[in-house]
Structure formats: structure tokens, C-alpha cells
Image (tube, grey):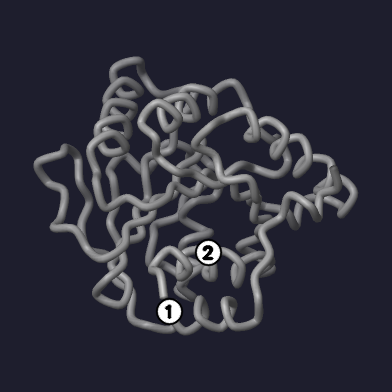
Amino acid sequence: MSANSVRAEFSNDEIERGEALFRRPCSFLKGVVDADGLPHPRELEVAFAGRSNVGKSSLLNALVGRKALARTSNTPGRTREVNFFELDDRVYLVDLPGYGYARASKRESAGWNRLIRNYLKGRAPLARVFLLIDARHGLKATDKPILELMDVSAVSYQGVLTKSDKLKQDEIEGVAEAVAGELATHPAAHPDLIVTSARTGKGLPELRAAIAALLGP
């Protein structure tokens, strides 16, 4: 299995549709700390999950072409809410709290994990979770609980490698194959990966296209 065979591919029309969607206005809507605060559903909802410091906020900012839509920090574990961003008045981009932060207290970790679990299991409009994975490290043991949760909850999810600019091309290919091989053993995982870099813009058109495709024709 080559790395190219596990990467998502899109036509020019699909890429343009994604670019057109992300040229529309996008703004922060609200941060939610419990299920009672969830906003009214929109036509499409996609979420971004990943370990602490995987680069979720940086990727979200790059995805919408804004420098500070989502708050970034070098301190892991800063995002402690489910943050909703509204795109084109019909799509929610949802930034989930990072998990696996070693310095978080057990009480904090339990609270974040409960919030993520309740959101994933009870949010009907959620079409897909994009699972962000640091290309330098691949999947880790701390990813296992959320993979199992999404499998059990039948939540469709797709792997997105972040920070690919930190690696050489052959290293990226090795990580992509290893991650794809692991995700293939999970029933709710999408078979194709998207390899990205918030710094260089690599893979962002494909990620935008993947989200636009979920809106249907």
C-alpha cells in the first residue's frame, strides 16, 4: 500500500466548491461547557478532534483564511470548551477540547472527556469528525479511547495529518501508511487520509473539499 493510495483525492470541481464555501463569512459563535448550551443545529456540522497541541486552532485558522478566528497557544490543554464557528450561516465548524494533556488533573481530564463523549454521542447533525494527528508522532495510546468511542457511537471520522512541513516526504509517506493501516481496523473510520500543514497550506484545499462534499449536491 503506497501513501498515495490512502490519501483523499478530489476533482477540480470539488476543490473549487470547497474554496467557494470557505470564501463565505465565518465567525465564532459560542463556547459550550455542557449539552444544555449546544446551539440550534445547522445544515451541516463537522468537528475537529485531536490530542492537546496537535494544532487544531492553527489548522482552523488556516482553513478559513483568518489569523485569529480560533485562539492558538503553545500551552497544551488551553481549549476547554466545545467551540462553535459558523460558516456561511449553514455550517458549524466545531473545535473539541484537546485530550491526553499529561499535566491536566484527573478532575479536569474527566470533565473534558465527559464533554467530548456527550457531544459525540448525542449530536444528531454531526456528519463527520476530522481526527487531527501530528505527523511527527502518528497515532498514540491516548488516541485509542476516542477511536473506540466514535466506533461505538457510529460517528464517521477521518484522519488528518497535521504539521507535515516538519517532515521529509518519505517520512510523511511512512506515517501516512501506518496511520491508514491502523484506522482501517476501525469500522467508523473513513479510509482516506488528508495530509496538511497550516504553515504551508498543504492539504487545505482537499480538507475544504471534503467538508463541502458533506453538504451534498
In the image, what residue occupies the spot 39% across and 50% down? 47
Q: Quadrant of the C terminus?
A: bottom left
**Residue toward you, 48 or 76:** 48
Q: Quadrant of the N terminus?
A: top right
- If you read the primary sequence from the N terminus, does the residue marked by circle 1 or circle 2 appear first? 1
Expressed as whole percent of the image width and height from the top left, the position of residue 132 reads: 55, 45
Tell me the amino acid under the disc marked 1.
Answer: Leu
Quarter location, residue 88: bottom left
Expressed as whole percent of the image width and height from the top left, the position of residue 113 reads: 34, 27
Distance (Cα) linking label 1 and label 2: 11 Å
Left or right: residue 170 versus residue 17 is right
Expressed as whole percent of the image width and height from the top left, the position of residue 152 reads: 40, 26
Mark 2 Cα-neighbour bin, 10 Å: few <14, some 14–19, many ≥20: many
Quarter location, residue 79: top left
In the image, what residue occupies the spot 84% across and 41% down? 174
In the image, what residue occupies the spot 75% across and 44% down? 176
What residue is shown with label 2?
Answer: 210
In the image, what residue occupies the spot 75% across and 57% down? 165
What residue is shown with label 1?
Answer: 21
| For residue 14, above or below residue 103 | below
Total numbered badges shown on the rendered structure:
2
- The outermost residue toward the right is 170
Left or right: residue 39 versus residue 181 is left
| For residue 136, above or below residue 197 | above
- The outermost residue toward the top is 106
- The outermost residue toward the left is 36
Left or right: residue 81 versus residue 13 is left
Mark 1 Cα-neighbour bin, 10 Å: few <14, some 14–19, many ≥20: some
- Looking at the rendered structure, the secondary structure element under dot 2 is helix
Tell me the amino acid under the disc marked 2.
Answer: Ala
